[in-house]
Amino acid sequence: MQKNSNKKSGAIISASVIVTIALLFVSIIVLVILGINSLIATWFLLLYIGVILAVIIGVLVSLAQRLKELKNGEAEEAKKY
C-alpha cells in the first residue's frame, strides 16, 4: 500500500508544479496585456494564454487519469507481465 501512496503523491506533486509554473506564466502575460495598447500584440498574448491554459487542462486530466489507474490497481496488474 505504501508504494501506491508514493505514486499518488508523486503524481500530485508533479502536476502541482507544472500547474503552478503555467499559472505564473499566465499571470505575467495578463500583466503585460494590461500595459499594451497594440491590438496585434494583445491577440498574440491571448493566443499564448489559451495555449498555456490548454496545457494546464491537459496536465489536470492526465493527473485524474493517473490517479484513477492507481486506484484501480492497474500499475500493480502490469507488474505481473
Image: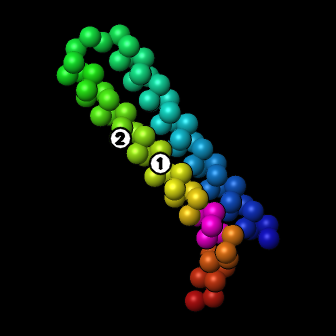
Q: Is residue 34 left or right of residue 18?
A: left
| Residue 79 vertical placement versus 70 (above, below) | below
Residue receiving disc 2: 51
Foreground: 24 or 39?
39
| Residue 3 vertical placement versus 36 (above, below) | below
Disc 1 residue type (three-letter): Ile
Residue shown at the point (46%, 52%) measured from the top left = 58
Residue 9 drawn in magenta: no
Q: Quadrant of residue 45?
A: top left
Q: Residue furthest right?
A: 1
Q: Where does the image place residue 44, in percent across and percent down from the top left?
A: 25, 28
Residue shown at the point (39%, 24%) measured from the top left = 29
Residue 69 drawn in magenta: yes
Residue receiving disc 1: 57
**Mark toward the start of the polypeptide (2 vs 1):** 2
How packed mark 2 is, by other alpha carbons closer than 10 Å (few <14, some 14-19, many 20 or more), is: some
Disc 2 residue type (three-letter): Val
| Residue 33 vertical placement versus 52 (above, below) | above
How packed mark 1 is, by other alpha carbons closer than 10 Å (few <14, some 14-19, many 20 or more), is: few
Q: CA distance from mark 2 to mark 1?
A: 10 Å
Figure quadrant of the N terminus: bottom right
Q: Which residues are magenta?
A: 66-70
Q: Where does the image place residue 53, in percent across and percent down from the top left?
A: 43, 40
